[in-house]
Image: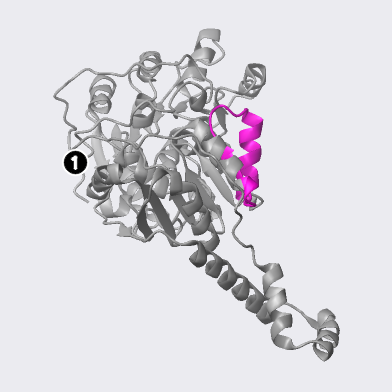
């Protein structure tokens, strides 16, 4: 691994990165930063969680002219959550250079954003629709832009933003530097690069680094009507510290989070129909551990950077293999292990095989847990908690009471009663979910360069954060574009 101090960075940026707790560059950072610092246009093929924000954020901060009150850098993102996350990291990177980054996104008061713009940030992180709104109002001007970054470009194009992106890039000076980051390389991304980038170089991370080797991946073949009970049994048996459950639609998320709450789990849902304040509240509670289970759609969870997620449950199999990689990448971070469990019906086995082909990882088939196993799992967890308290806590205030109880009662039934009181027994409250047809993917999968992004299910206006119109258009032009060179690392 390469140290940041070996990448030719300024002392103040090295100081900022050190304050963030980073010393060694990740593979995408090691390959991207020197070339970006040299002024090259780059395409980075990397998943969320590989350190790509710092990969483009460090060169961007280094290129900003200090003391200037002009916007010199723009980052486009598909969701407001990712915009906020990128802005937070850029502000940390630029703290000692005095470089300010402002997130701009739909769902936030326009007047509030205009007031924030008057503080003269040098970098803007924006969702395309809201940036277009500011361009029309002339509250953001792009004539001094030195660098443009497209973050999760494939997702932005899947969501119909191609025309907005093209309109924005036309307004930026031609001598700018452009960096594009995408998990996949569909034809639409190649077309965009051919039109707006200057001899871009492709930097691609090895698949074994992309798929995250420290995540155990399992699947259960289960009937649709059995899914909810099986999910509850797994939660009882595995007792995750923080878990994300992925549902295919907004209605699915609402029904799942409500059903889990009815059965006594600390759960909340997140999707695009929620107000911004509600989304922020749910995410804050999840990060703090007040909520143990977050139920989310793909788009709502895109770009979330939450540490400590121990389990990911794919209640509905994702609509494309790339989305699976994004989902399971929520866990197994910072060197920790994670568990990803996918539910499939018999008709969805073909889609599962496509995912295995892309990730180059076979999922472990697990039997459907029984109710007895779920009860035994809860009993085991309670016993482990009890032994942990004995080993770690100060019990002296309770020892006198314990002695009194033991003088009058036999120790075995007394301890059994305590375990019964502490054990969360499976709840049998009836929960009804709207029937969902099994997902039927393509019959064959040729790899990330041969398949477009996911379908349009649950990808409407509200799940994009409410910015702009509901653009279902996609860029279907074809070209013979090839990057100038490919990284062999």
The structure residue drawn at horizontal position 51% and vertical position 8%, both measured from the top left corner, is: 136
Q: Nearer the viewer, residue 257 or 196?
A: 257
Helix, strand, or loop for circle 1? loop
| Magenta stretch holds residue 279 | yes
Q: How many marks?
A: 1
The x and y percentages for residue 182 are: 33, 36
**Residue 76 horizontal/vertical position (percent):** 44, 27
Residue nearer the viewer, 148 or 15:
148
| Magenta stretch holds residue 424 | no
The residue range painted magenta reads 261-287
Q: Which residue is most to the bottom?
A: 407
**Is 459 on the left-hand or right-hand side of 359?**
right
To which residue does mark 1 refer?
486
Relative placement, left or right, of 184 versus 81 is left
Position of the N terminus, as image quadrant, is bottom left
Residue 163 found in image quarter? top left
Please say if 142 is above or below 328.
above
Q: Residue furthest left?
A: 480
Q: In the visual, does 281 lie left or right of 176?
A: right
């Amino acid at each position: 691994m390469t140290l940041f101090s070996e990448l030719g960075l300024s002392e103040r940026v090295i100081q900022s990165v050190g304050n963030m707790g980073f010393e060694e560059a990740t593979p995408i950072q090691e390959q991207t930063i020197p070339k970006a610092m040299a002024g090259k246009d780059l395409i980075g093929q990397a998943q969320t969680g590989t350190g790509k924000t710092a990969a483009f954020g460090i060169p961007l901060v280094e290129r900003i002219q200090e003391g200037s009150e002009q916007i010199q850098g723009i980052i486009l993102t598909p969701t407001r959550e990712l915009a906020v996350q990128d802005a937070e990291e850029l502000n940390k990177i630029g703290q000692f250079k005095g470089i300010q980054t402002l997130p701009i996104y739909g769902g936030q008061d326009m007047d509030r954003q205009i007031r924030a713009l008057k503080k003269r940030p040098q970098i803007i992180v924006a969702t395309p629709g809201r940036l277009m709104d500011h361009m029309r109002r002339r509250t953001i001007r792009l004539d001094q832009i030195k660098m443009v970054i497209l973050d999760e470009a494939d997702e932005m194009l899947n969501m119909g933003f191609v025309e907005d992106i093209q309109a924005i890039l036309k307004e930026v000076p031609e001598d700018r530097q452009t960096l594009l980051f995408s998990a996949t390389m569909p034809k639409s991304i190649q077309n965009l690069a051919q039109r707006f980038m200057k001899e871009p170089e492709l930097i691609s991370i090895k698949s074994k680094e992309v798929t995250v080797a420290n995540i155990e991946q399992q699947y259960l073949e289960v009937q649709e009507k059995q899914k909810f009970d099986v999910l509850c049994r797994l939660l009882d048996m595995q007792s995750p510290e923080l878990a994300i459950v992925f549902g295919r639609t907004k209605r699915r998320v609402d029904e799942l989070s409500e059903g889990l709450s009815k059965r006594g789990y600390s759960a909340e849902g997140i999707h695009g129909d929620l107000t911004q304040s509600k989304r922020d509240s749910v995410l804050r509670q999840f990060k703090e551990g007040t909520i143990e289970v977050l139920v989310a759609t793909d788009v709502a969870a895109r770009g979330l950077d939450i540490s400590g997620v121990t389990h990911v449950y794919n209640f509905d199999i994702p609509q494309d293999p790339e989305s699976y990689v994004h989902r399971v990448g929520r866990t197994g971070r910072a060197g920790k292990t994670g568990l990803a469990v996918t539910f499939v019906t018999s008709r969805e086995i073909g889609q599962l095989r496509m995912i295995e082909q892309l990730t180059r990882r076979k999922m472990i088939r697990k039997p459907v847990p029984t109710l007895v196993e779920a009860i035994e799992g809860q009993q085991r967890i309670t016993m482990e908690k009890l032994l942990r308290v004995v080993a770690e806590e100060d019990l002296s205030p309770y020892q006198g009471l314990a002695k009194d109880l033991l003088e009058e009662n036999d120790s075995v039934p007394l301890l059994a009663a305590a375990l019964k009181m502490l054990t969360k027994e499976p709840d049998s409250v009836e929960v009804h979910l709207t029937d969902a047809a099994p997902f039927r993917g393509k019959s064959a999968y040729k790899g990330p360069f041969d398949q477009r992004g996911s379908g349009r299910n649950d990808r409407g206006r509200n799940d994009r954060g409410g910015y702009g119109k509901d653009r279902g258009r996609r860029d279907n032009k074809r070209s013979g574009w090839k990057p100038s060179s490919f990284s062999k690392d």
